[in-house]
Amino acid sequence: MATFKLVIGDPKTKKSYQKEVVEPNSKKLNGMKIGETFKGELIDLPGYEFQITGGSDNCGFPLRKDVTGPVRRRITAVRGVGIGKPVKGMKQKKTVFGNTISDAVAQINVKVLKEGKEPLVQKAEEKKDEQSA
């Protein structure tokens, strides 16, 4: 059963909101890649449009755009996602996850491209109320 934590970044308010996506909506996100856009109707946020910016797999390894497929790989890199503050000219070996969303992904980071009618804050507060009841 695929369940994702969706971290939604809102560029207007500079805030992030979390939403849990469970089946059958999570199956619709499988196979998408970093950089792709999707409509908010897929995750029950009508009117919104989102772009996938990254994420991490179930072991905590970051998704990286230049590694193709839904696989975990060990890469040699100088800078970018998953690489700490580099020492000048020094390459590092790091384990990263590919750019494709699969069942092994735990968190997906997205940003808002197009606003819907209802604010994200209202949706997040409704979710909290449902969970506490």
Image: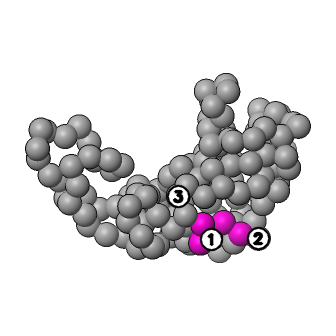
Seen at 63% across and 31% down, the residue is: 11
Q: Compared with residue 59, is residue 47 higher up or lower down, i.e. above or below?
A: above
Identify the amino acid type marked 1. Asn
What residue is disc 2 on? 24
Which amino acid, by three-letter code, is at mark 3?
Ile
Q: Secondary structure at mark 1?
A: loop
Residue drawn where x is 82% and y is 56% of the image: 41
Q: Position of residue 98 (x, y in %)?
A: 42, 66
Q: Position of residue 54 (x, y in %)?
A: 50, 52
- Whether the residues at callouts 3 and 1 have beta carbons within 8 Å, the answer is no
Q: Which numbered disc, 3 or 2, marks the residue that appears first in the sequence?
A: 2
Which of the 4 quarters of the picture holds residue 85? Answer: top left
- Residue 93 falls within the magenta-colored stretch: no
The answer to whether mark 3 and mark 2 are in CB contact below 8 A is no
Q: Quadrant of residue 65?
A: bottom left
Q: Which residue is mark 3?
A: 34
Residue 7: x, y in percent? 61, 45
